[in-house]
Amino acid sequence: MKDFFDKPTLDAELNKSAQRAKLFSYLTIISVALGFIQLVVGIMNNTGNLLSLFPFIIQTVISLVLAYNLFKYASFISKYEQSKDSSFFSVSLGHLKNYFIVFGVLFIILFSLILFGILISILAMIIS
């Protein structure tokens, strides 16, 4: 069995990782664009209102920050593979770290809201 840190295997895995990260960043940007079109059509048909703009802006900013970090990770990994300069590798891992930090904070917020909702429903059952 080949060692994972064997150079050709590591380079191939980094290349795959960069391709997938770039693909997901493009898909995220397309998703945001489709969401914007949906928002505009909803407002034009009077099925949406301007209050629906606020959650869309929050979702768009978060999605674009995630997509930006994935894209930069993929770009710097590609530069690292071409030049073998470790500074590109370090910068790419920094962008990947930022991606997971944002994702982790969002997960913690969502998990907290779910627990808060469960707590409120339990208290409502106890009180009534």
Image (cartoon, rainbow, N blue to C red):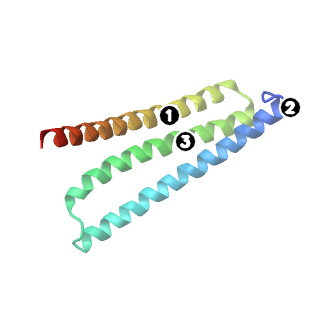
Q: Residues within 10 Å of mark 1 (few under 14, many from 20)?
A: some
| Frontmost residue, 67 versus 55 | 55
Quarter-wise, where is residue 122 in the image?
Answer: top left
Q: Give the residue number, with chain letter if any, for mark 2.
A: 2
Percent coordinates x, y for residue 107 in the rendering = 41, 37
Percent coordinates x, y for residue 95 in the rendering = 53, 33
Image disc number at residue 100: 1
Image disc number at residue 70: 3
The Cα–Cα distance between marks 1 and 3, rounded to whole angstroms, is 10 Å
- Does dot 3 land on a helix, a strand or a loop? helix
Image disc number at residue 13: none
Q: Residue at x 62, y 41 (%)?
A: 74
**Which amino acid, by three-letter code, is at mark 2?**
Lys
**Which amino acid, by three-letter code, is at mark 1?**
Phe
User: Does residue 58 lie above or below 80 as drawn?
Assistant: below
Q: Residue at x 12, y 44 (%)?
A: 128
| Frontmost residue, 113 versus 89 | 113
Quarter-wise, where is residue 37 in the image?
Answer: bottom left
User: Does residue 3 lie above or below 22 as drawn?
Assistant: above
Q: Residues within 10 Å of mark 3 (few under 14, many from 20)?
A: many
